[in-house]
Image (cartoon, helix red, strand yellow):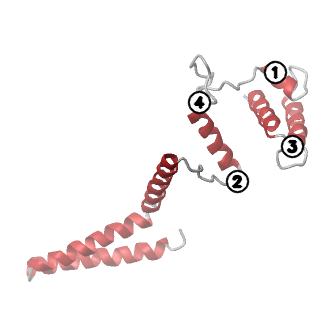
Amino acid sequence: MDGDGIVVGIAAVFAGTTVLFTVLAAVYQPFLLLFAAIFGAATYLLWYHASGSLGERVKRTAGSARRRRNAAAGGPRDFEGFGPGRRAAEATGERARGAGGRSDGRRRPGGRGPDANALTRSEAYRRLGLDPGADQAAVKAAYRERVKAAHPDTDSGDREEFKEINRAYERLRD
């Protein structure tokens, strides 16, 4: 985004050149329409780039081609990075593979899609070590305590337990 002002400026110069060649072609020589078309195409591409649409389209096209190539070759899945983006990608990946769907095909209340791992409120309270009906402050405190102990990046961390604690907290936040 830092260089967008320069790209827009260059696109404006190219647009002016396109108009100039179009006028000159109408007055003097129709052959100049060829140059007007070339500058017009360049203007379009520059504007498309400055708006951000070109970069998004290239990323989308390249990403889908890479995924198709890896799937066809049986190769590794794309690396999704660290943090919330990776967790979101893993969640959608699990749903796409069918690991998160309910056996009866029904949707969860609230329109969030199928989820076989949905806990009842009483199970969620048990998972966090709370009595049913605990207030939000107690839920939050218990969640923070449990998640620190079960986080996969710690020595004693357990990924599955960490996921269960997060599911329980999300259930009680609703």
Badge 4: how crowded within 10 Å, few (<14), some, or many (20+)?
some
* Image location of residue 150, percent across then percent down: 86, 40
Q: Nearer the viewer, residue 115 or 24?
A: 115
Amino acid carrying label 3: it is Gly
**Residue pointed to by mark 2:** 82
> For the point 59% across and 28% down, which residue is it?
113
From the viewer's side, name the closer residue of 38 and 47.
38
Q: Amino acid at mark 4?
A: Gly
> Which circle marks residue 157 in the picture?
3
Q: Secondary structure at mark 2?
A: loop
Which quadrant would residue 10 be assigned to in this image? bottom left
- Measured in 3D between alpha carbons, the distance from the residue under mark 4 to the one under mark 1, in whole angstroms, is 23 Å
Compute the Cα span from label 4 to label 3: 26 Å
Q: What residue lies at 70% left-to-right and 53% top-to-bottom?
A: 82
- Foreground tag (3 vs 1): 3
For the residue carrying disc 2, how many other residues have a C-alpha within 10 Å: few (<14), some (14-19), or many (20+)?
A: few
Residue type beneath disc 2: Phe
Q: Name the residue carrying label 1.
A: 123
Residue at 51% across / 74% down in the picture?
3
- Report the Cα–Cα distance between label 1 and label 2: 29 Å
Q: Which mark is residue 156?
A: none
- Residue at image mark 4: 98
Q: Amino acid at mark 1?
A: Glu
